[in-house]
Amino acid sequence: MSADRAPTADRSRVGDIIRVASGNFLEMYDFMVFGYFASAIGAAYFPGGSSTGTLLKALATFGVGFLMRPLGAIVLGAFADRHGRRAGLLLTLALMSVGIVTLTVTPSYATIGVWAPVLVLFGRLLQGFSAGAELGNVSVYLAEIAPPNRKGFYVSWQSASQQVAVVTAALIGVGLSTVLDPAQLTAWGWRIPLALGCAVVPLMFLLRRHLRESDGFAQQQSVPTLREIAALLWRGRSAVLGGVGLVLMTTVSFYMITAYTPTFGKLLHLPERANLLVTAGVGASNLIWLPIIGALSDRIGRKPILIVCTALAVVTAYPAMAWIAAGPSVSRLLIVELWLSAIYASYNSAMIVHLTEVVPAEVRTSGFSLAYSLATAIGGFTPFIVTWLIDRTGNVAAPGAWLSLIALISLGSVLFAHRGSASRASG
């Protein structure tokens, strides 16, 4: 490529990153809103019983959408591997849009009875189905448009777009908690951020409509049939299962330090507005670390970063949480969350691109999405699991034990899985 064409190509790639990341932002924004306002959503759709029981029902509904991700990964991932990344991204955006509209407009249990939780569950399942391939499709697309030796940096923007959603949703929550009293926020205020998400859907479609097909897919000599995709996935099952172990650390740590933070802060009896500000700080921290470590992984390789981050999580997660439990305060919560943010973002920036490199090109979207969604089917229940653990044990530091266990599993996958695969992005 000549020197005068290089800036044009770079600008084109920047535009593609923005277009592809827009829908990824919307998906995560909706997930974050549900997590931040889980108590209010539980009161609206799952009334009765204790406040903890209502919260657990809401968090279980938050988590159940992740159970649909493996199915979405197979069905929608195969669609993208056959019809192209652009077509797959438009389809997942359409499905997730229906899901967010459903949750936004469904009346409360007091208005329509049992149909309320049924409709909310339908919306969550649809969102989970679409999300099963959305993240994989975005990651694969970015890897396929990236210049040689810059895949780590490019793919990091998939996760970076999610952090923008984390910050945006948290700041909207802070604004609402400022202008509305707790009763108003519980009664109807939580619908406002969902309605704002619905309002930007047309813009997301406009952006993705002008997305070009990735070079990686366009240069494929042939498109696999559904039977061939299934056969390739089966033959590559060891890589997929190894990928599940790799992704577990990402999903558990992400949902613990973002979606669960406002709920965790409530359990610590900290101010709701402060909890949301801490969450916004976590998102901003993630946004800073992701591209930096993504670029570093292009220089030193993925594996050293993956080993260091998982080892740090194993040895520090529980002591950090125990430190908060010994003297709950906003400052301690912020310090611990920022520490876990640095570990999560550094690990994730190397892990995502590594996973795109170990999956066969013919089934790159479906294979990546399947591994990621199977792990998320576990990690997505993290808010429910850690709330249940705290309720059962009375130990507020229990989330740290859960994260340490998962980090140990991921460390094993880093050390023993994909031994024959390249750990550096070389093309």
Image (cartoon, rainbow, N blue to C red):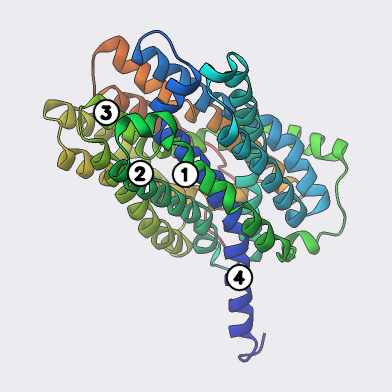
The residue at which mark 3 appears reads as 266
The residue at which mark 4 appears reads as 15
Indicate the position of residue 164 as horizontal and vertical percent values: 44, 54
The residue at which mark 2 appears reads as 176
Residue, far top:
49
Task: State the SS at label 1.
Answer: helix
Q: Considering only order in the chain, which callout, 3 or 1, is on the residue closer to the N terminus?
A: 1
Residue, far left:
327
Q: Considering only order in the chain, which callout, 2 or 1, is on the residue closer to the N terminus?
A: 2
Badge 3 amino acid: Lys
- Rounded to the nearest whole Å, what is the CA distance between mark 1 and mark 3? 20 Å
Q: Considering only order in the chain, which callout, 4 or 2, is on the residue closer to the N terminus?
A: 4
Q: For the point 74% across and 47% down, which residue is it?
A: 91
Indicate the position of residue 167 as horizontal and vertical percent values: 39, 51
- Rounded to the nearest whole Å, what is the CA distance between mark 3 and mark 4? 40 Å
Task: Give the label on residue 193, or none.
Answer: 1
Quarter of the picture containing the C terminus is bottom right
Task: State the SS at label 2.
Answer: helix
